Image (tube, grey):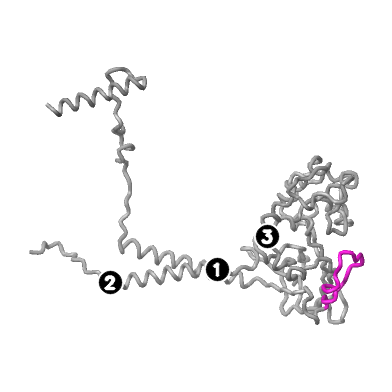
Amino acid sequence: MMASSYNAKEEDGHIAAASTHGGAPGVVKSKKPDNTAFKQQRLPAWQPILTAGTVLPAFFVIGLIFIPIGIGLFVSSNNIKEFEIDYTGVDINNPCYSCAKNFSWNNTTPCLCSLPFTLEQPFESNVFMYYGLSNFYQNHRRYVKSRDDSQLNGDRSALKSPSKECEPYRTSEGAPIAPCGAIANSLFNDTLELYHIDINGTRNEIPLVKKGIAWWTDKHVKFRNPGGNDNLTVAFQGTSKPVNWRKPVTELDPADPDNNGFINEDFIVWMRTAALPTFRKLYRIIQKKPNTTPTLPSGKYVLEITYNYPVLSFDGRKRMILSTISWMGGKNPFLGIAYITVGSICFFLGVVLLIIHHKYDTRNTSADIPS
């Protein structure tokens, strides 16, 4: 009697709730999920059972695949020839010591220094010349934000009124700075020239190609001059050069009008900020001449430097790097070492687990039922 009374009250409560929420009187709404395979969790599923017969082969297969790949990557990286020379000028015996110590932004006369070096082995095919900086944090949050992409894309309104993100390099002497921001203001502007000393002691200049060092998308999409490239003097009229620049943006490359303004490739390369405080950026390309080998023969060379970029104030270092490339890019042994390490660990774990499996596997494989 008590049970039927309770059920009647519960049913009346459901009916009342249904009526309250706009449902039809007499219809009971249930909270029970629908009786479907999805809602009742009856969908077919694969539940892997890890056994020695499935796990051990996986370890050995991974090891046997990764180790050869790692060896190939490591050997390819080691076959890339690379030469690096520091020209910061911190050592008193360094030819650039005087330029580094006596640097002044007010000095209009460029300081020149020559750094001799020797290549012990020849460089084949195309050779890439980089400049490298150390202890330079291009990944600092405020530094990375200090730019105006609309201005760099040729927007005339942004040219006259740069973004506030460029502060304190937004205006100079009442005129808007073009290009604005801390990244552009710190543009690397050392000039590097390379000479080969032949057996007669004659200096032969090595041709350095400055086109093709920037990403295609940067050169043709992200960076555009306001009003095209017809008359940059008129386009940038009423703007000011960045504070630390010696020349305005319209005179970055006087020898090549198509390499001026915001589409100057040295400028574009610099504006792509580095992720680490020690980095290198492509400066020039030494192209291999037809029917000539090698591109850079072994012997004596001289690096001529126009010292415009101070780094001693933040304990930085500057260097010039010559490098060849392979199918995998530049010299980077890390990827090969990583593959070899992972493959070796998997193979080693496979051997250890195999020994443990054979030594401690006491399962009874007999079909007889023990009495």
Q: In 3D space, how far apart are the residues under numbered discs 2 and 1 (Cα atoms)? A: 33 Å
Percent across and percent down for residue 358 are: 28, 71
Task: Give yes or no for residue 193 being in the magenta stretch.
Answer: no
Q: In 3D space, how far apart are the residues under numbered discs 3 and 2 (Cα atoms)? A: 52 Å
Looking at the image, which residue is at 57% across and 70% down?
74
Residue at the disc numbered 1 = 336
Percent across and percent down for residue 188 are: 78, 62
Q: Crowdedness of circle 2 by 10 Å Cα count: few (<14), some, many (20+)?
A: few
Q: Which of pointers 3 and 2 indicates the residue nearer the eye?
A: 3
Going from N to C along the chain, the mark reached first, 2 or 1, is 1
Q: Crowdedness of circle 1 by 10 Å Cα count: few (<14), some, many (20+)?
A: many
In the figure, 37 relative to 97: above or below? Answer: above
Percent across and percent down for residue 137 are: 69, 62
Q: In 3D space, how far apart are the residues under numbered discs 3 and 1 (Cα atoms)? A: 23 Å
Q: Tell me whether the residue at label 3 lies in contact with that at label 2, contact meaning CB atoms closer than 8 angstroms.
A: no
Going from N to C along the chain, the mark reached first, 3 or 1, is 3
Residue 334 in the figure: left or right of residue 196: left
The range drawn in magenta is 95-113
Residue 78 in the figure: left or right of residue 47: right
Going from N to C along the chain, the mark reached first, 3 or 2, is 3
Q: Which of pointers 3 and 1 indicates the residue nearer the eye?
A: 3
Residue at the disc numbered 2 = 358
In the figure, 297 relative to 11: above or below? Answer: below
Task: Give yes or no for residue 96 being in the magenta stretch.
Answer: yes
Secondary structure under the numbered disc 3 in the rendered image: loop
Residue at the far right: name it: 109
Q: Please, what is the three-letter code of the amino acid marked with disc 2?
A: His
